[in-house]
Amino acid sequence: MRIPREGEFVTIQSYKHDGRLHRTWRDTMVLKTSEHSIIGVNDHTLVTESDGRRWVTREPAIVYFHQKFWFNIIAMIREKGVSYYCNLASPYILDEEALKYIDYDLDIKVFPDGEKRLLDVDEYEQHRIAMNYPKEIDFILKENVKILVDWINNERGPFSEDYVAIWFKRYQQLSRRC
């Protein structure tokens, strides 16, 4: 698969552990690719749910995907500040069709004031049992929650104010060119 270039668009597809398509984001603009990561932006992006329901994202959001970590990060740029939505998920793969990952239900939301909440623990437990998640995956996900909380607490990577500002500015520059 050819790695997308800055300014190109990719589709993002999230799946569940049992292989069912969960959600699709159409036309995410690529801001940067490296050997192991992709940074992009969604801005009024069409999202399609597995049940066919469709909606459009409300604000610009910088998205961060990595091939070594079991999470992805969405930095939503809002009037009251940046909010983060972090999905505990498999590392991504990229093929001719889309950037793809498995969503494992657990999420961490970070509010502009720094408050953190672990979300969907009950849903994770239900799916862990119903879809028979291997013990290794359960362990990996719980370890990656710790890594993610450390990144949040220490303002690493996407949790840095500078990171969001730099990539949002780059998005604005690319948008003007198009």
Image (tube, grey):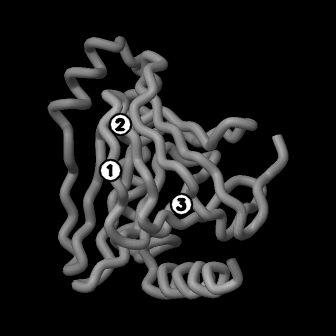
Q: How many labels does the image show?
A: 3
Amino acid found under the numbered disc labelled 3: Tyr
Q: How far apart are marks 2 and 3 (CA)?
A: 20 Å
Q: Quadrant of residue 140?
A: top left
The reply, left or right, for residue 121 in relation to residue 140 is: left
Percent of width and height locating residue 166? 57, 85
Residue 146 locus on image (x, y percent):
37, 52
> Disc 1 or 2, which lies upstream in sequence?
2
Q: In this view, does 138 lie to the left or right of 28?
A: left
Q: What residue type is labelled 1?
A: Trp
Q: Name the residue under label 1.
A: 55
Q: Mark 2 points at which residue?
A: 49
Position of the C terminus, as image quadrant, is bottom right
Q: Which of marks 1 and 3 is in front?
A: 1
Q: Tell us which disc is closer to us: 2 or 3.
A: 2
Q: Residue 64 shows which numbered tag? A: 3
- Verify CB contact (< 8 Å) between mark 2 and mark 3: no
Proximity of marks 1 and 2: CB atoms separated by less than 8 Å? yes
Query: Gap in Å between the C-alphas at discs 1 and 2?
Result: 8 Å
**How many residues crowd mark 3 within 10 Å: few (<14), some (14–19), many (20+)?**
some
Q: What element carries label 2?
A: strand
